[in-house]
Image: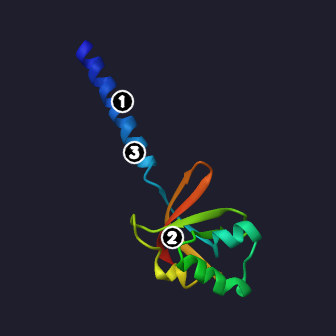
Amino acid sequence: MNRLATLGISLSLAIGLAGAALADDGAAKSVTGNLEDSHCYGTMGAKGAGHKMCALKCAAKGIPVALVEKGTDKIFVLLPNKDQSPLPDDVLHRMEDEVTITGKEYSKGGVNFLVVDSVK
């Protein structure tokens, strides 16, 4: 009986750990909104067609790119799909435009992140 109980506890623990690992993997999501450079948008509220050239320069210099979800104030910080890689050119060249980004969503410490898989 003792071996059976140990087996049951071990199996339950393994299933629980596997579930936690899968939950940490990020959920697939598509978000439609405007691409903004986070510095100007966050500090001055700058956005729109008149800010496009500045946003392009900021993004090219490495200022984090934010996707402001359409119809909400929810902001996603965009991340490349591989560590130590830049964001795709499709993102950088479409600053201040409305786009749909598909990728994996993560949330840490109250910040929303979206790993870019595709841009439409």
- Looking at the image, the residue that sits furthest to the top is 1
Task: Please give the label number shown on residue 86.
Answer: none
User: Within 10 angstroms of label 2, few (less than 14), some, or many (20 or more) residues?
Assistant: some
- Helix, strand or loop at label 3? It is helix
Q: Could you say whether the residue bearing mark 2 is in a helix, strand or loop? A: strand
User: Residue 27, position in %: x, y?
Assistant: 49, 57
Identify which amino acid the numbered label 3 is placed on: Ala
Q: Position of residue 99 (x, y in %)?
A: 60, 79
Compared to residue 79, the image places residue 118 above or below, namely below
Mark 2 to mark 3 CA distance (whole Å): 22 Å
Q: How many marks?
A: 3
User: Looking at the image, is mark 1 or mark 2 nearer the viewer?
Assistant: 2
Give the residue displayed 73% in from the left and 87% down from the top: 50
**Circles 1 and 2: CB distance less than 8 Å?**
no
Q: Which residue is mark 2?
A: 102
Label 1 to label 3: alpha-carbon separation? 14 Å
Q: Earlier in the sequence, mark 1 or mark 2?
A: 1
Q: Residues within 10 Å of mark 1 (few under 14, many from 20)?
A: few
Specify few, some or many for label 3: CA neighbours under 10 Å numbering under 14, 14-19, or 20 or more. few
Residue type pointed to by label 1: Ser
Mark sitting earlier along the chain (2/3): 3
- Residue 49 placement, left or right of 2: right
Question: x, y percentage for residue 66?
Answer: 61, 69
Residue 92 lies, with reference to residue 106, above or below; the image says below
Q: Amino acid at mark 2?
A: Thr
Q: Quadrant of the N terminus?
A: top left
Give the residue at mark 3: 21
Whether residue 78 is visible here, answered yes or no, is yes
Between 105 and 58, the residue placed more toward the observer is 58
Give the residue at x 63% y 80%: 55
Residue that badge 1 annotates: 12
Expressed as whole percent of the image width and height from the top left, the position of residue 78 reads 54, 67
